[in-house]
Image: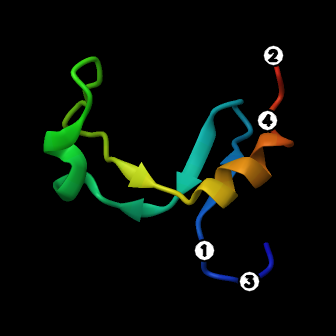
Amino acid sequence: MSGENCPDLFELSDGNFAVIGTDRTEELGGRLPVDASRADYERIVVITRETLLRAKRDIPDA
């Protein structure tokens, strides 16, 4: 909302969350932990630690 072009995490009106970050699917797709997977329509998006920590205060506990 500040007009800066940076990663963000925000809640949608349906209660889901959207992430704006860097698409690193090609780079990280083959390096997922053994208990992780993604569908063909899903992408691996990276946001900074700072972005997630700042968003934490806005994410409800339940």
Task: Look at the numbered discs 4 and 3 and tell me whether their residues touch, using CB distance below 8 Å.
Answer: no
Compute the Cα span from label 4 to label 2: 9 Å
Quadrant of the image containing the C terminus = top right
Q: Which residue is mark 1?
A: 6
Between residue 11 and residue 62, name the one nearer to us: 62
Q: Quadrant of the N terminus?
A: bottom right
Name the N-terminal-most of marks 4 and 3: 3
Residue under the point 19% across and 57% down: 27
Label for residue 15?
Answer: none
Q: Determine whether, in the image, residue 41 is placed left or right of residue 50.
A: left
Comes first in the chain, label 3 or label 2: 3
Q: Residue at 79% x, 35% y: name it.
A: 59
How crowded is the residue under tag 1: few (<14 C-alpha within 10 Å), some, or many (20+)? few
Q: Name the front one of labels 1 and 3.
A: 1
Q: Is residue 19 above or below residue 14?
A: below
**Mark 3 crowdedness (10 Å alpha carbons): few <14, some 14-19, many ≥20:** few
Residue reaching furthest to the left: 30
Q: Which residue is mark 2?
A: 62
Q: Residues within 10 Å of mark 4 (few under 14, many from 20)?
A: few
Question: What amino acid is found at the position of numbered circle 3 in the picture?
Answer: Gly
Q: Amino acid at mark 2?
A: Ala
Disc 2 from disc 1: Cα separation = 27 Å
First-in-chain label (4 vs 1):
1
- The secondary element bearing badge 2 is classed as loop
Res 3 label = 3
Q: Amino acid at mark 4?
A: Ile
Of the numbered discs in the image, which one, if any, rests on residue 59? 4
Which numbered disc, 2 or 1, marks the residue that appears first in the sequence? 1
Mark 1: which amino acid? Answer: Cys
Spot occupied by residue 8 in the image (x, y as percentages of width and height): 64, 60
